[in-house]
Image: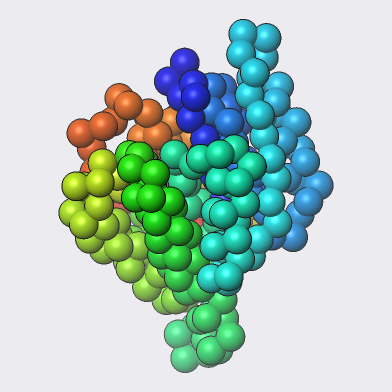
């Protein structure tokens, strides 16, 4: 088991990729803090799966916390409550994310703020809260940000989303250098098209889905577990020499340009 004795906080883990990550980290032996914003029932489902993932060979504990990761006060409270509950925090997975589709000229300030607050500002200050805790306790740590292929690839009609993920790419690079002396590594995992609630509209639109599948060399959408397995690696000591890097989990989508 790669993560016995470790405590991990996974934001946005009441559904989708976050839920799969929480379960996978528990399978590796970590105690897990499950964060949700508005779906306590989803968080409870994750919690029971986390406990079950522990199985009989080891005990794994879970704990759910409501927090809007787009609000600085909330993320600070979330990290403080995690530390209080488990006595420490080793791993932070900044997974919560939102996207809103609109033509660039129609994007409202409210929608821009909502996307940037969750996808970038909340990540910034949750990571800061973890880093303060790790420095105080002189412990190493792992930060894993769930970014997107769109930290690199344009996504017309999702301009705020792309700006947030591009920002996340540079935040990771910057922090990897600044935090290395403290034994804290920072990496991004960048999913492509994954079967999750964020893609509900797309999954129900067979024309759009067909066009997207043609762009994915491996010929299928990803599963949340495809993302969770690389997060488990990055959370473990096996990746101790890896920092400041993005791992794409996209079936080849990012580099698939072919002349017709
Ligand atoms: C977005 C999805 C999109 C995928 C591939 C993800 O970051 O959240 O809506 O389908 O990228 O473009």
The x and y percentages for residue 78 are 60, 56
Q: Nearer the viewer, residue 81 or 67?
A: 81
Q: Quadrant of the C terminus?
A: bottom left
199 in relation to 230, above or below: below
Q: Quadrant of residue 16?
A: top right
Q: Quadrant of residue 36?
A: bottom right
The x and y percentages for residue 147 are 40, 55
- Number of marks present in the image shown: 0
Q: Residue at x 63, y 24 (%)?
A: 60
188 in relation to 88, above or below: below
- 68 sits to left or right of 233: right
The x and y percentages for residue 256 are 28, 48
Query: Can residue 111 be seen in the rendering of this structure?
Result: yes
Q: Quadrant of residue 251?
A: top left
Q: Residue at x 61, y 66 (%)?
A: 74
Q: Residue at x 22, y 60 (%)?
A: 174
Q: Residue at x 52, y 35 (%)?
A: 7
- 160 sits to left or right of 33: left
Q: Nearer the viewer, residue 71 or 53?
A: 71
């Amino acid at each position: 088991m790669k993560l016995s004795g470790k405590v991990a906080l996974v934001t946005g883990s009441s559904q989708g990729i976050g839920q799969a990550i929480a379960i996978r980290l528990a399978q590796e032996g970590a105690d897990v803090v499950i964060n949700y914003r508005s779906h306590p029932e989803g968080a409870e489902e994750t919690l029971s799966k986390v406990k079950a993932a522990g199985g009989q060979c080891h005990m794994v504990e879970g704990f759910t916390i409501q927090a809007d990761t787009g609000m600085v006060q909330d993320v600070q409270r979330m990290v403080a409550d995690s530390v209080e509950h488990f006595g420490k925090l080793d791993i932070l997975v900044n997974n919560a994310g939102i996207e809103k589709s609109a033509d660039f000229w129609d994007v409202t300030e409210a929608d821009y703020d909502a996307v940037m607050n969750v996808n970038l500002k909340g990540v910034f200050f949750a990571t800061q809260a973890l880093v303060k805790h790790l420095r105080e306790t002189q412990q190493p740590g792992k930060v894993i940000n769930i970014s997107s292929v769109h930290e690199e690839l344009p996504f017309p009609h999702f301009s705020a989303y792309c700006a947030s993920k591009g920002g996340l790419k540079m935040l990771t690079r910057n922090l990897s250098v600044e935090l290395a002396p403290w034994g804290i590594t920072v990496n991004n995992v960048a999913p492509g098209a994954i079967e999750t609630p964020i893609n509900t509209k797309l999954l129900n639109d067979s024309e759009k889905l067909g066009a997207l599948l043609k762009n994915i060399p491996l010929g299928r959408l990803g599963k949340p577990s495809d993302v969770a397995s690389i997060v488990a690696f990055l959370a473990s000591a096996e990746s101790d020499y890896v920092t400041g890097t993005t791992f794409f989990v996209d079936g080849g989508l990012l580099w698939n340009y072919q002349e017709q």
